[in-house]
Structure formats: structure tokens, C-alpha cells
Amino acid sequence: MAARKRRKGRLSVGILWHQHQPYYRTRIGGDPRDAYLLPWVRLHAVRDYYPMAALVSEFPGVHLTINLVPSLVAQLEEYVDAGATDRWMELSLKPASSLTPLEHDFLIARFFDADWDNEVRVHPRYAELLELRLNRVSFRERDLTDLQMWFNLAWFPPEMRNGTVTLEDGSDLTVRDFVSKSHGFVRDDIEELLDRQLTVMRNVVPIHRRLLESGQIDVSVTPFYHPILPVLVDSDLSTIDATGATLPPRFAYPEDAKEQIDRAVAFYTDRFGRRPRGMWPSEGSVGEHMLDLAAGAGFTWMATDRGVLEKSGEWGYETEDPDVLLRPYMAGAGENRLSVFFRHTRLSDDIGFTLQGYADYDHAAEEYLGWIRTGFADRVEDRSERIISIILDGENCWGSYRNGGRAFLRGLYRRLEDDPDLVAVSFTDYVDGDPERRLPAHPQDEQHEVSPLFTASWIDEMGSPHGNDLNIWIGSPEENRAWELLGKARSRLAEAEATPKSHPRAYESLYVAEGSDWFWWFGDDFVLAPGVDLAFDWLFRERLRDVYRELGEEPPSELDAPIRRRFVMWTPIEPIDAVSRDRAIRCLVDRPGTLVWTTDGWRTRHETQLTAIGDVMALHAGYVATIGPFDKECREVGFGFRWRGATRVARRHTIRVVESGKAGEAEGTRGD
């Protein structure tokens, strides 16, 4: 048997954890204590933003990149410095005896918003409360108070639930006392727990600053409110390929794209005392027509997805070849050049969507690095001239891992420290080199030029032809309606000769509305709970209404109508009994097939194909079909499923159709 050929040097492994939340504040300007509509900045800060940085600090030989979006950091600061709250925080503090019926239903619906298997059922008292909900047993006051507590307590990381953590400011923090108490909580307990959340939040930026100054991490940045830059520059250049997709009226404001970038650079420089070197463009969305803006802002590098490289250049690139995919690239011309790194899609998505299913996470880490060695390190000629880029959200996936994925992350970092053929680097490390770590520099004039850079993002929309594009954010009727309304507000600013200097709040509202997240949830690409999807819809339209208000004008009435089609969710785990006739029913199941339904007692049948759909991180979440709204004669809708390969309809279900707003608990418990 021939000996394995020895490869030169070490293959660089560039990991980037992307930390991001949209701007949830209910109004721009005014009292900084105005409540945020959603709690995810606060909760992810406790579970993910601080612990992810602290965890890598345990392994000094591991260098990586953490991307902090300015709209996230700005909200953290408003919580800890200005007393901002969120609706969920305020409801946590409200005595159970004082809750209104709507607030009562909201708690039961939304205070289980965590991974049920890994973050709810692992806590006996929280599991009891979940069973009450699933069995539709009435909650007593003490049950509601315990629910208020456990929703906030379960978001603390395992290090703080099981022991004591010394935070960046030197304070010690634990919630082990509350975990041990388990039940019978009172308002003082909840107040103390929320104070501990704020203590963790106060330390998020400081720990990143220290690790940046030590050189162990690089902190990269994203345009301020997370917009899709290629669309802001010129929506007519957007790549869409989904069946029936069309482009909205043209939106072309490169000055807005520049402002979003420039604000991010200034914000970062103020917080970290230096200019950022790298940029993860929102959703990895890039294109040749936005390169001058990125390079002109002084960035050394940016990153996007393998699928973009595959379609770039005159003929595309053979990204199955590791020597092609893993080389550093240079994009742009003249002085406006920067390095571009292309994430390995499968290896990035494996962490986000696959490895949590392993029984042994330490083995998962070993197998993961084995894939990198055999699939890449052993196949490139000179390892020191190649980098494999692994880029994904550093927040959303950890709830689906047991114990927050700590065994996997520690196993991964420990092996990277010791591996003779691999070296964990930040992208800035890779460009600059590091003699102490035996890392050669990779200056731009030695990098392969990629031109033109294809216009796309990190994702290929589910159900569309193969190839990355921008379909998630533009092209469907709901998305295009949002772009149309945004364009009208932007045009009105120009017509009124308003400038960012003369009308700062109007422009601030506009920039928030340009963020990607609102468009992500429009259309039928992804699943979001009823009520929460309408919250995103309302926040988007409220920002546009603010544009007109700041001009001293009455907002147009068309902004009063929701963009998002209204529906209630039905799943086999959480069925519903009744639906208002003005709502649609969205049925979500775990396998392909056909939804068979009727409104006349099964005399007439209709069939709707179940469509594959994704969730918050584009993971394949299941199969969905939507029926309704229903006309005034309809009193009942029946439906069942014919699974793929079967000839008969499985168990049938019946839902009452009632007058609008009278569906009661069936909809109220879902936060609608």
C-alpha cells in the first residue's frame, strides 16, 4: 500500500460566529426606556453573546472571528445604560394576579419559546408547566409566576445554571440558587434574576474588546441595520430565479448603502478604539456593484458563500476542487480592492443544522475535523496557502444542542489547538500573517482575482433552481410590496428635500426599515409563529410611518394594512379548535405529501401540495400548506394528509370557523 503523500504546512481554519438581531425598538428617538417589542437581544446576550466569547478564551491557541452587528450592540447598550425594557420583560415582572386575559394567554403561548427538549423539558418544573399547556389545563397564579421565572431562567447558559462564572468586570454570577429552588417563586426572585441578566449583558462588549486587544479574536462588523447591500444599491440588479418571482419598482439608493457602512465603521471605531478590518455583509450578500463601497470604507476583507464563487467570473468556478474553493481571492480594482473569503456551505451548515443530532458531541467534534482533514487538508498541495471558511450564526443553533453544545465546542477547540495539520485563525490573521504562530502573510497582490463577483447571498432559496441568489429578500408579492412601500417613503424624503442632517429621525427610521430581517419574514419562505410574524410586519410599517411623521405629514393609509397574510398555525403537536374566518390555517408537518381538505362535510374535496419550508436559520423545518381565509357561509373546515406514496387520507381533523376575533384561546395562546 502506497504511503500517503505528505502535504506542506498547516491548513488554516477560519471560523466566524455571526451575532445579530434586528432593531426591535417600538419608536425612534424619544424616551430611551421605550420597550422593545421582542426580547431576543436580552436573551441571546445571556445564553450566547457572552458565553461564546468566554468559551473561546479557554483555548488560547484557537483564534477566530466574531461578527457583531451594530444594531445588536446599540440595543445592548440601551438595556444596560438607558433602562430599556421589552414587552416580555415587563410581563415577567407583572404580578400574575394583575394579568389581563390577553396577557395571560400571551404568557402561556410565548413563554415556552425555547427548545422544548433541550431547554424546557430538562427542567422538571418547566416541563410540568409545558404539560399543563399541552393538556390545556388552567394555570393557577403560582403556575404563571413560575412560568414567568422559568422562561427567563432557562435562557441562562449551563455554566451559570450549574456553577459560578467570573465575568469580565470581576463580578461572580450564578443562577444555581434559583435552579435549585425550582418552584414557588415570587416577584423578588424575578426582579433579581432580571438584574443578573443585565449584569451579563453589561459584560458582552468588554469581553470582546479584551479578546480583540489580545489578538485571540478579530471582531468584524456588518452594515449598521443589516441591509441587503446589493438591493439598496440597485434592486434591478437583484438575482431572482424562483418560479413566478418578479422585481418590484426600482429601489436604487447607493448613498443609503454607503451610510449604513460608514455608520457601522464609526460605531465600531468608537467602541473598540480601532477601525474594523473585516466585514460580513448582511446575509453574505455581495455583488460587483457594491465592491467600491466596501473597499472604499477601508475594509481589508469580507466574506460570502461558496455558491457566490461558483457563479462568479466569466465561466464560474469549480468549487468542488479544494484548491479552488480554499484559496484567498481579491476583488475590486485599483485602490478599491479587498480580499474575499468564501464559506464552505456544508461544513458551516453541519454545525448549525446536523451535528446536534449526535449522541456523543465529543465524537461529533472529532468526526467534523476528520472531514476537514480528509476532504481538504489531505487534498491541497500547499496547506499554508489555503483557508477553509466556516461561517454561521453564533446564536440560534445552540438551543437545539443538549447543554448548549458545550461538549461539541470544547471538543472542537481542544482538537484545533492540538492538531498538527490544522490551525485556527481569524481572517485578519490569515491576511496579515503571524510569525509567532508560524502563519505566512497573504497580501492582496498575491491573491487570485475574482471578477465579476456574482450578485447573491449565502443562501439558495428552498424550492428554486440550483444556485445562490437574493430570492429570500425580493421577488415574492409580499417582499415586493414591502420594497414598494419603502421606495415610496424614500422618494418622499427626496421630494421634501429632507437630508440626514435636517431630518435625522426620519432617516434613522428609514435605515432601520432597510434592514434585511423584515424582508426575510415576508413571503412563504420560512416559518414564524403567528403573532410574532405580525410583530415583524408592524415594526417595518411603523418605521415607514415614522418617516412621514418626522416630515410633519400624516402617514399614508396603505401603511395601516398588514403586508403579511394573517394565519394561525396548526401542527400535530399543537392543534387548534377554532379559527377566525379572516385568517388562513397554516398546517406544518414533518413529511411530504398532500393536504386534502373540505368545507362542506367531505362532499367536495380539495387538494394542496405540501411544500418544503425552512425555519429561522433556513434549516429544513418541515412541509407546509395553507388554506383559507374562509367565506361567510363556512362553519367548519376538515382536513387530513395523504403522505407521499400512500393512497388513503390519514386521520382527519376538524376546525370550527367563527366570526373574526372570536376564535378565543385557539388563537390567543399563539400570541396573535
Image (spheres, rainbow, N blue to C red):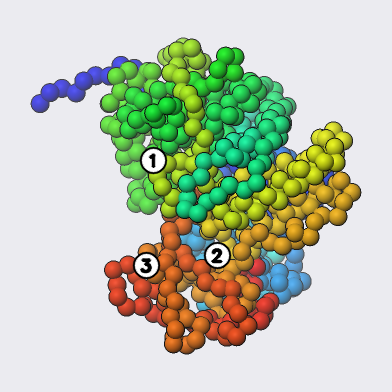
* Residue 45 image-quadrant placement: top right
Label 1 crowd bin: few (<14), some (14–19), many (20+), radius 10 Å: few
Answer with mark 2 or mark 1, whichever residue precedes in sequence: 2
On the question of residue 173 being in view, the answer is: no
Amino acid of disc 2: Tyr
Q: Position of residue 529 (x, y in %)?
A: 58, 62
Answer with mark 3 or mark 1, whichever residue precedes in sequence: 1
Label 3 crowd bin: few (<14), some (14–19), many (20+), radius 10 Å: many
Q: Where is residue 475 in the image (x, y as percent from the top left)?
A: 56, 49
Circle on res. 126: 2
The residue at the far left in this view is 1
Q: Which residue is identified by label 1? A: 346
Answer with mark 3 or mark 2, whichever residue precedes in sequence: 2
Q: 197 or 460, which is in the foreground?
A: 460
For residue 61, above or below residue 392 = above
Residue displayed at 65% across by 68% down: 672
Q: 349 or 254, which is in the foreground?
A: 254
Residue displayed at 72% across by 41% down: 511
For residue 149, above or below residue 15 = below
Amino acid of disc 1: Arg
Q: Which residue is identified by label 3? A: 593
